[in-house]
Image: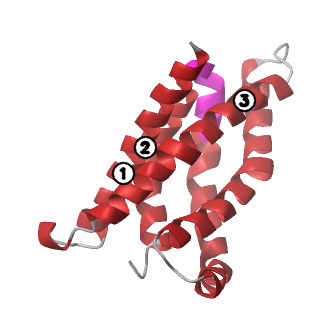
Amino acid sequence: MALSAYFRESIKVGLIMGGGDMIAQFGIEKKSFNEWNYARTARFGALGLVVVGPALRKWYMTLDGMVAKKQPTLQRGFKKMFIDQTLFAPPFTLALSFIIPYMNGDETDKIISRIKEDYFTIMKGGYMLWPLAQIVNFTLVPLQYQVLYVQIIALAWNSFLSMMLNKSS
């Protein structure tokens, strides 16, 4: 049962991340259908299926256990958001900032250089979106729907992230 929940969640995340890459390519990068890099979309979606979906599900379950349930809902939500945005978001964003260009065939030196150039811009963008989104998530959304909620919000974020991390693709 638990395995199937992980699998279902991962499929949803993969589809949403693939959709975010398509929005980036068609809506932001203004590519025509003939210019669409479908392999890039497939890789971005696969990353959601294999890495992001399972990691988020495990993290939210762990985070839920880290913060005492006896606290008022809003206080608990703020604590979870703070822990999420300080302990999880920076290293997870850094990992994605390496993995995505690596999957696209970029050389390690180029990836590291781009991380040095873009990481703080990506984090700044994340901090403009995620703290409020996570307060809503952790105070109003039941645990079993938190990954799905985040991925719906992440449709816009994934478009931005895909654009930033696929500059040379």
Asked whether the beta carbons under mark 1 and mark 3 sit within 8 Å of each other, the answer is no
Q: To which residue does mark 1 refer?
A: 18
Three-letter code, disc 1: Gly
Q: To which residue does mark 3 refer?
A: 77
Residue 157 is inside the magenta segment: no
Q: Residues within 10 Å of mark 1 (few under 14, many from 20)?
A: many
Three-letter code, disc 2: Gly
Query: Which dot, 2 or 3, sits closer to the camera?
Result: 2
Name the disc covering residue 159, or none. none
Q: Secondary structure at mark 3?
A: helix
Q: Could you say which is closer to the camera, residue 45 or residue 73? A: 45
Q: To which residue does mark 2 refer?
A: 14
Q: Residue at x 27, y 62 (%)?
A: 38
Depicted 80 relative to depicted 89: above or below:
above
Mark 1 vs 3, N-terminal side: 1
Q: Which stretch appears magenta?
A: 134-144
Q: Could you say which is closer to the camera, residue 91 or residue 102? A: 102
Locate the C terminus by quadrant.
Answer: bottom left
Q: Secondary structure at mark 2?
A: helix
Three-letter code, disc 3: Gly
Asked whether the beta carbons under mark 2 and mark 1 sit within 8 Å of each other, the answer is yes
